Amino acid sequence: MARRTMSLLLLPRWSSRMFSVELDGEPVYFSIQEKSRGKEVSRVFSNVQNNDRCYSLLVCSSDRVEGAKFYAELKQKLLREMPKECALSPMCSFLPNVKDSLLKGYFLKDTSPSASLSERVLRELLQHEPVLVCSYLRGEDGQQWTQCLWKESDNRAVEMSRDFCVVPSEAPESHPATLNIINSDVFYNFEEACEVLKESADIIPEATSVLELLPSRVEARSKPDFPVIVIEGLDATGKTTLTESLKNALGATLLRSPPQCLSPLRARFDREPPLFRRAFYAVGNYITAEAIGQEGMKTPVIVDRFWHSTAAYAIATAVSGPVCNLPAEGSEVYRWPTDLLQPSLVVLLTLDPEERKRRLRDRGQGETAEEQELDHNQLFRLKVEEAYHRISGPACVTVDASPPADQVLQQVLLLIRGKCHL
Ligand SMILES: Nc1ncnc2c1ncn2[C@@H]1O[C@H](COP(=O)(O)OP(=O)(O)OP(=O)(O)O)[C@@H](O)[C@H]1O
Ligand SMILES: Nc1ccn([C@@H]2O[C@H](COP(=O)(O)O)[C@@H](O)[C@H]2O)c(=O)n1
């Protein structure tokens, strides 16, 4: 019932929506108009042959947990049930500059001989799942495409609503994913991240175990007496090596985020869709912050990954395409959470990609799916690094991690002594 309410609510602004289909990893934008102006064909349809059929499916649930879970399952469901000749491209729809207006889904190009199977699958999805379904029809001139939003009637049959013409569109000012980053991919206070875990407890029982480990609320603590130094960087840039050496050199306490107590639950959340995975890492920072608050009264504290990692990986994953698609420097998505302890210094270790790969190979350990993505996808790696640089309050200080380990240590000790008077 919630799904239908949402669909109807969307319709009044349906014609103001923009659409984006990922072609070769790049978003291609189009919008819809009541009357066709000009004959320009959207690039989305440039390779569609006469007998091919195109559809779009957008997940629209008023319940974010249900929506996130269903979106994650949808691809497998479509691959399983649609004709094997049906190609899927990620797509989304959004109202330009309207926060939280992003709907994610798939664009389908079906080249199978008959429409019957795909239309049956889509009809069933429309009736039972939180989705909007559209089909695209080629105009009589063979050029212009129209978009028809499907709707249910009497709980069964599928009718088409009024058609709109598809027109190519310029890229919006900011990548559409930016509209939904706050509180879906990145959480800017403890309560918001906890709320996701509470809402997801029915479908992810481990969320309850995480909640039990959390402080009941985040207390406004006074700053620790000793400096707190965070070491950040992509995997295999030398964080573990450096943090261990710093611990010994400074007589410091070494902590990490996520903290040890979350280790048994980590693999479970790494398999979950971004909403849940990011909330898990977000609350991990608050557990580590509690420990920093206590240990920082006794010794300097070194922290292996903290907030910069949580936000940078989340933003880089949410935003598709090249680095220029990231939210601009100064965007609110790069701000530090209001209630999270601020370190005295954040050091970002950077490394030439080839050397990083060599160290990964030499280490010979397994990689997480996200780490494999870093290896295979140069764009993703660049986006993570750029997002690291753009996060503020505190900003990170970059250190070249390519010299031998003892030289990197000396370089960072110099920085610490300069900044933290140790
Ligand atoms: N400065 C250095 N020069 C050469 N090799 C290094 C240097 N620092 C670390 N290494 C080696 O590179 C590999 C990766 O280092 P390390 O495990 O410290 O990275 P990491 O950033 O903690 O990785 P991850 O985030 O994946 O845990 C290790 O085999 C380590 O011995
Ligand atoms: N504070 C953190 C720490 C880590 N992450 C996520 O974990 C992955 C990298 O961690 P490794 O321990 O394998 O180096 C990466 O996928 C980050 O998304 C995080 O979000 N926040």
Image: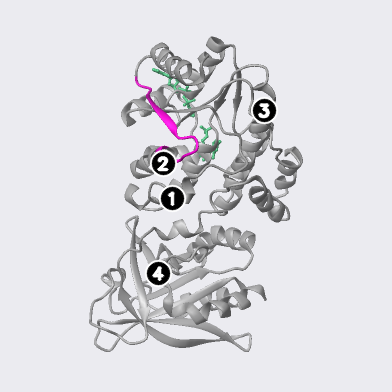
Please name the residue that numbered disc 3 is placed on.
293
Say whether disc 4 or disc 1 marks the residue closer to the N-terminus.
4
User: What amino acid type is highlighted by mark number 2?
Assistant: Arg
Quarter of the view holding residue 395: top left
Please tell me whether residue 72 is drawn above or below residue 7 in the rendered image.
above
Cα distance in 3D space between marks 2 and 3? 26 Å
Check contact, mark 1 vs mark 3: CB within 8 A: no
Cα distance in 3D space between marks 4 and 1? 23 Å
Please name the residue that numbered disc 1 is placed on.
331
Q: What stretch is highlighted in magenta?
A: 389-402
Q: Does the magenta stretch include residue 394?
A: yes
Question: Residue 383: where, in percent of width, then height?
Answer: 38, 43
Say whether disc 2 or disc 4 marks the residue closer to the N-terminus.
4
Q: Is mark 1 within 8 Å of ligand 2?
A: no
Q: Residues within 10 Å of mark 4 (few under 14, many from 20)?
A: many
User: What amino acid type is highlighted by mark number 1?
Assistant: Ser
Check contact, mark 1 vs mark 2: CB within 8 A: yes
Report the disc number at residue 19: 4
Q: Does the magenta stretch include residue 183?
A: no
Please tell me whether residue 340 is drawn above or below residue 402 in the rendered image.
below
